[in-house]
Amino acid sequence: METYFNNRQHKLTATHLYLNEPLPQLANFDWLIVMGGPMSANDETAYPWLREEKRLINLAIKSGKIVLGICLGAQLIADALGARIYKNRHREIGWFPIWPKEEINTTILKDLLPSRLEVFHWHGETFEIPQGGVPIAYSEACENQGFIINNRILGLQFHLETTSALAKALIQNSPDELTTPSPFVQEKNEILKDTKRFSGINTVMWHLLEKLESQCTA
């Protein structure tokens, strides 16, 4: 995503909440992109900054910003909108296909996903579709793989932004998660064996960002 925004000469800033960095002011950004993490969206006691992050998400949504959440980020958006976050029936890590839901054809994401797309996953929890949300995809292991609201608020449980370098970092920092018994958890070598997979999903992410950006001038 950084490459996409830099190519369009957009200014990027980042807030590392785990380092106690202050959240940005609402007037200082047009897009809010909320990324992943190993914690649960429900872990406010252990990670008190989650409360303020959800508050900012809610304010950004109400103010008409474009809001994109990925994995934990999608769960935080759903939580901020009153939807339930809960443990998925399977931990899902590695390359598994998703299928678009018919409802996606009513949104700007129409034609974004082919009839079957193998994407990268790394999650153990999932979300209910928040009120007003249009479900966009599902996998064998997880019914709710994404939602979109008003064509500008988007939550993705799966990962289109991951590169091979990022996947290696995930494996290095969370190797214990790969030992969890699950038919939907792949081994390290299987995850990394074909780097072309990453460039494929990155292309889809590029098109997704184009579709979201089109809403800025719509």
Image (cartoon, rainbow, N blue to C red):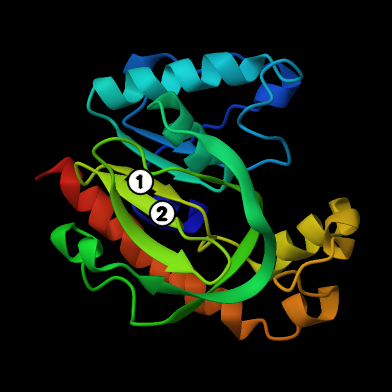
Image location of residue 77, percent across then percent down: 44, 33
Q: Residues within 10 Å of mark 2 (few under 14, many from 20)?
A: many
Helix, strand or loop under label 1: strand
Q: What is the tally of numbered marks visible in this picture?
A: 2
Q: Determine whether, in the image, residue 178 is placed left or right of residue 20.
A: right
Residue 201 visible in image: yes
Q: Residues within 10 Å of mark 1 (few under 14, many from 20)?
A: many
Question: Residue at the location (72% across, 64% down)?
Answer: 167
Q: Determine whether, in the image, residue 62 is placed left or right of residue 118.
A: left
Question: Residue at the location (33% across, 73% down)?
Answer: 113
Image location of residue 4, percent across then percent down: 42, 57
**Label located before the other in sequence (2 or 1):** 2
Amino acid at the residue labelled 2: Gly
Amino acid at the residue labelled 1: Leu
Question: Residue at the location (62% across, 51% down)?
Answer: 88
Quadrant of the rendered structure where residue 168 is? bottom right
Q: Determine whether, in the image, residue 88 is placed left or right of residue 142.
A: right
Q: CA distance from mark 2 to mark 1?
A: 7 Å
Between 173 and 117, the one lying in front of the other is: 117
Location of residue 205 with respect to 118 vertically, above or below: above
**Which residue lies under the disc numbered 2?**
146
Question: Residue at the location (22% across, 27% down)?
Answer: 64
Location of residue 30 with respect to 44 vertically, above or below: below
Q: Determine whether, in the image, residue 113 is placed left or right of residue 25.
A: left
- Given this view, does label 2 or label 1 mark the residue nearer the observer? 2
Image location of residue 28, percent across then percent down: 37, 20
Residue 205 visible in image: no
Q: Are marks 2 and 1 in contact (CB under 8 Å)?
A: yes
**Which residue lies under the disc numbered 1?**
154
Image location of residue 204, percent across then percent down: 40, 70
Helix, strand or loop under label 2: strand
